[in-house]
């Protein structure tokens, strides 16, 4: 039997670059289509991304794990009663339901004014998978970096949460800074990407320009250690300058570069 003149799979000049990125590059072709493996991988990634949007967060298990690490836990719920309402009405996910408001009001009544520097909110967002995988190790790293003189409020786990829900929670607890750890909209290569949103002087009505974002916290992205260091660089500057958002740029890496350059000069 004669051999075919050309290989079934066409070679791609980018093939050697695949070791540098998990992105879908250099897939090659089988005739005018993708190879079967590449097509099946794409279909699987799409299914995982869809599932991570609809997967419910196991709040009980997460709360238990965080309590074991010494965190005080509160559980609240947005005005979205279920996942479908959450997806169809984003505004519901930005507001607490009445029971949660009464719950936080009771906590507020026993907290002296100005006693809480930082409140951390953990929201399921659009990927509860991200929260299940990364919230606990990230919170442990955050706890290591909290300045000794800072007072940490309860960690508030929020169900059917959008980013802005943290503003109302932070306002109820009179926090100087509120931080939201939330699952981001899944991608085909990152169904479990977690993001941090930080707001100084949180209150209902804050917009995206008032927040700082640290994104892509996952196994193939930003490490927990780096994310925590960036967060507290921003948090300290937010307290010092009394602002956050577009007016506050993350220059933590510039400081690291300056330290390295100074070290080189000494050598």
Image: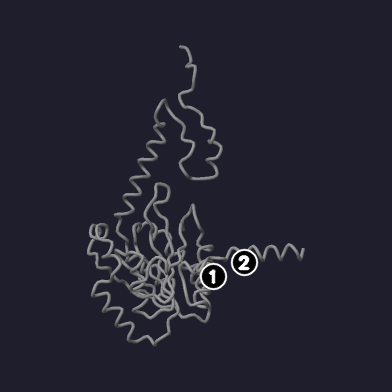
* Colour scheme employed for the rendering of this structure: one colour
Q: Secondary structure at mark 1?
A: helix
Nearer-the-camera pick, 80 or 40: 80
- Disc marking residue 132: none
Q: Secondary structure at mark 2?
A: helix
Tell me what residue is drawn at x 77 percent, y 63 percent.
Answer: 267
Tally of marks = 2
In the current view of this chain or complex, which residue is farthest to the top? 1
x 27%, y 74%: residue: 100
Residue 38: x percent and y percent? 41, 36
Tag 1 residue: 233
Residue 244 percent coordinates (x, y):
46, 71
Residue 91 located left or right of residue 261: left
Instruction: Residue 255: give its label.
Output: 2
Judge the density around disc 1: few (<14), some (14-19), many (≥20) Cα neighbours within 10 Å: some
Mark 1–mark 2 CB contact (< 8 Å): yes
Q: Which label's residue is closer to the chain start, 1 or 2?
A: 1
Instruction: Identify which residue is drawn at 51% across, 32% down.
Output: 12
In the picture provided, is 238 more to the left or to the right than 253? left
Q: CA distance from mark 1 to mark 2?
A: 10 Å
Give the residue drawn at x 24%, y 64%: 80
């Amino acid at each position: 039997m004669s051999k075919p003149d050309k290989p079934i799979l066409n070679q791609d000049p980018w093939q050697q670059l695949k070791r540098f990125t998990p992105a879908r590059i250099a897939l090659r072709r089988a005739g005018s289509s993708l190879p079967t493996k590449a097509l099946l991988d794409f279909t699987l990634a799409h299914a995982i991304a869809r599932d991570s949007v609809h997967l419910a967060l196991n709040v009980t298990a997460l709360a238990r794990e965080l309590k074991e690490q010494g965190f005080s836990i509160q559980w609240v719920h947005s005005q979205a009663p279920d996942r479908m309402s959450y997806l169809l009405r984003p505004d519901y996910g930005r507001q607490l339901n009445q029971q949660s408001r009464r719950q936080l009001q009771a906590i507020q009544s026993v907290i002296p004014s100005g006693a809480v520097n930082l409140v951390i909110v953990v929201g399921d967002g659009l990927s509860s998978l991200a929260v299940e995988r990364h919230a606990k190790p990230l919170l442990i790293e955050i706890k290591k970096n909290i300045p000794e003189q800072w007072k940490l409020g309860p960690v508030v786990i929020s169900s059917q949460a959008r980013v802005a829900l943290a503003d109302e929670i932070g306002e109820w607890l009179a926090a100087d800074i509120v931080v939201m750890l939330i699952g981001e909209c899944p991608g085909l290569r990152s169904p479990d990407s977690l993001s941090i949103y930080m707001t100084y002087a949180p209150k209902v009505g804050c917009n995206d320009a008032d927040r700082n974002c640290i994104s892509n916290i996952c196994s193939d992205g930003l490490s927990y250690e780096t994310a925590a260091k960036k967060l507290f660089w921003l948090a300290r500057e937010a307290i010092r300058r009394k602002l956050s958002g577009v007016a506050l740029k993350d220059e933590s890496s510039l400081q690291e570069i300056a330290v390295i350059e100074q070290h080189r000069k000494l050598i």
